[in-house]
Amino acid sequence: MPSVADRVADELRLQLAEGVLLPGARLTESTIAEDLGVSRNTVREAFAELASERLVVRHPNRGVFVASLEAGDIHDVYTVRRVIEVSAIRGGGTPEAVAAVREAVEEGKVAAAANDDEGLGTANQHFHKAIVALAGSRRLNTIMAQVLAEMRLFFHKATMDAHFYSGYLKGNEEICVALEAGEPDRAAELLLAYLDRSEEKQAEVHGE
Amino acid sequence: MPSVADRVADELRLQLAEGVLLPGARLTESTIAEDLGVSRNTVREAFAELASERLVVRHPNRGVFVASLEAGDIHDVYTVRRVIEVSAIRGGGTPEAVAAVREAVEEGKVAAAANDDEGLGTANQHFHKAIVALAGSRRLNTIMAQVLAEMRLFFHKATMDAHFYSGYLKGNEEICVALEAGEPDRAAELLLAYLDRSEEKQAEVHGE
DNA sequence: ATCGAAGGATTGTTGAACAATCGCTAAATT
DNA sequence: AATTTAGCGATTGTTCAACAATCCTTCGAT
């Protein structure tokens, strides 16, 4: 039974992920409390949760705002991803963990066949989540989950075209094959190149 | 102007770091509110902050308890450290960042000369913080800070002897030298060995 | 001894209140 | 006219008091 504060946080997370709440938007305690039919205090607890995930930033005495990533933040996020994902993949991982990676790749193929852009995006996230899971660390998994949630925030502004995603799809397949072939170092190289390309694209789309 | 909730969180963090509050101990909202002269609601917000840092765990409807690391958690924490620290040191880092590593090493020497065990411990933490800072990522820095805070929690139970720390001291010096010599890969090897040794020791001290 | 039913304590949540602070507007000063 | 100042309104930060929900324990019944 999740607490009310958790449900509020979930609802807000959803709205953030779906782009209902755009970066920079202000979240007023009272209106959210009314909208969701909860107390202001409960909203406050939810805010604390979201703030700890960097999805939202608190300006003391001014309110909380949907986090918006600056150019520097994009590089920072990709630095984290390079460090974590590349290390995780270098370790190889258990057969089950590798199977999960494969599963994410297939999920992407299905979405691509169905022309489901939304599904392609989530499949891609599942792929990277599975990559990190190779390390078998609970803490790394949650760290990665937070980074991915943070990235979803500006994916909306950057709404990349379908070709972009299908490019990812092919790359993921290659990485997965290298992994399955027992060549984690090669997989790591491919992943690294992928991340560099992705960051470049993001920086480009995100302006200046 | 830190908010009251922040100050409460700071105070609790302090007590956690100093071992006033031992792992597994229960934190009752009302008593803490009284002790610190704040509202129960404010204590609640502080708890949310600490929980997000894993210093404390919430058992729904039961209360919050000082986090206590199980054997599995120790391995997990060291996995995170291996991934982040080794990657960070492999990148080499800017001269200023390397200088910060050197500074932490010297800090340790001073503490050792003064027979200051406490100081030796914090110098060691500064060293690893500086290692991660080589990557130049704000996010990685805060992640590392949290991991170190988490580790401080069970350092008390494990109160390692002075010889243990002085062994660290020598290792840190070697790593630093390798870094300064422009051999980050060798530094990474040393660091990795260090972390493995450290984990082993921790697991040993922590029982079973 | 086992099981189950009160009882007490603590958390989860609400609602209302008030001080502190911020941003804005309009008046006042130069 | 431009800039400073003063005041106003709105929102946050914090407290307090209450109550429902939940858990742990104790006590009693079988």
Image: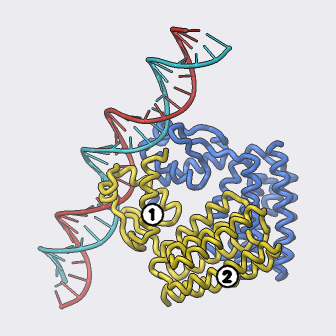
Chain colours: A yellow, B blue, C cyan, D red
Identify the residue at image location x=72%, y=51%. B73
Asked if the residue under mark 1 is in contact with the one under mark 2, i.e. CB atoms within 8 Å, the reply is no
Helix, strand, or loop for circle 2? helix
Q: Nearer the viewer, residue B45 or A143?
A: A143
* Mark 1 residue crowding within 10 angstroms, few (<14) / some (14–19) / many (20+): few
Q: Nearer the viewer, residue B36 or B140?
A: B140
Residue B199 position in % (x across, y down): 81, 55
Residue A13 position in % (x across, y down): 46, 62
Q: Nearer the viewer, residue A87 or B111?
A: A87
Identify the residue at image location x=77%, y=73%. A179
Return the residue at label 2. A171
Return the residue at label 1. A14
Relative to residue A38, is residue A171 drawn left or right? right
Kindly identify which chain the residue marked by label 1 belongs to. A
Decide: is A78 above or below B125: below
The reply to whether residue A17 is visible in this rendering is: yes
Q: Earlier in the sequence, mark 2 or mark 1?
A: 1
